[in-house]
Image: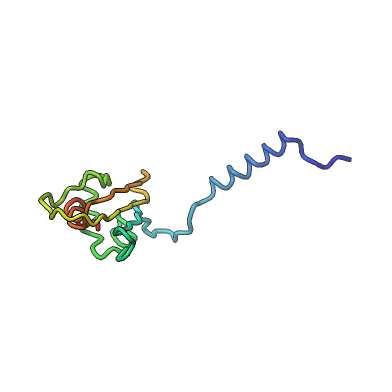
Amino acid sequence: MNFGLTAARRTAALGICVAAFLSAPSGTHPAGAAVAAARLHISVTPDGGGGAYAMRLMCDPDKGGHPRPAAVCDALRAVDGHIERLDVNPGACPMVYQPVQVKVRGVWHGRPVAYHQEFSNTCAMDRALSPLV
C-alpha cells in the first residue's frame, strides 16, 4: 500500500494549514485593551557607531520607550505618519561633517513604514526630525 500523499494533496493540505494560521487572531489582547494603531522602532546611529540609540514608539494610544511620545505622535499625525514630510525646525546648521543615520521601521495605521536617511550631522537630523529623534 502507498501511504504517501500526492503532490496535489500535499499542496492542498499546506494551503489549508496556511489559511488556518492566517485566520487565527494575531495576538492575545484582553477584551477592551487598547492596541496601538502605530508601532515604530526608531534607531539613530552616528558614523562609527558610538552613541547609537534606539527606542520604540506607539501612537493611539501614545506610549512607548520614547521620552516624548505625545509630542512625537502629534507631529507624526500632522503628516499622516510620513516621516519624510517632517520639517519641524528649518534653519541653518554648521558645516561639520559627522554623519548620522536614522532608521524607522514599523506600521502606521496599517501602512508599513520604512524610513532611512543619513544626515550630515546631528544638527541637520534634529532640524528635520525633532521631536522624533
Location of the N terminus (image quadrant): top right
Image quadrant in which you'd find residue 100: bottom left
The quadrant in which the C terminus is found is bottom left
Q: Residue furthest left?
A: 91
Where residue 120 sits in the image (x, y, percent)?
22, 52
Residue 96 position in % (x across, y down) = 17, 56
Counting from the top left corner in percent of width and height, residue 132 is at 24, 56
Query: Which residue does the image show at 54% across and 45% down from the upper left?
Result: 22
Residue 59 or residue 88, whichever sits in front: 88
The residue most toward the top is: 8
Q: Tell me if 16 is positioned left or right of 90 in this view.
A: right
Using the image as rendered, state which of residue 112 and residue 24 is in the foreground: 112
Residue shown at the point (39%, 58%) measured from the top left: 32
In the image, 75 versus 49, the foreground residue is: 49
Q: How many marks?
A: 0
Residue 117 relative to residue 127: left or right: right
Residue 108: image x %, image y %? 33, 48
- Residue at image location 57% in from the left, 48% down from the top: 21
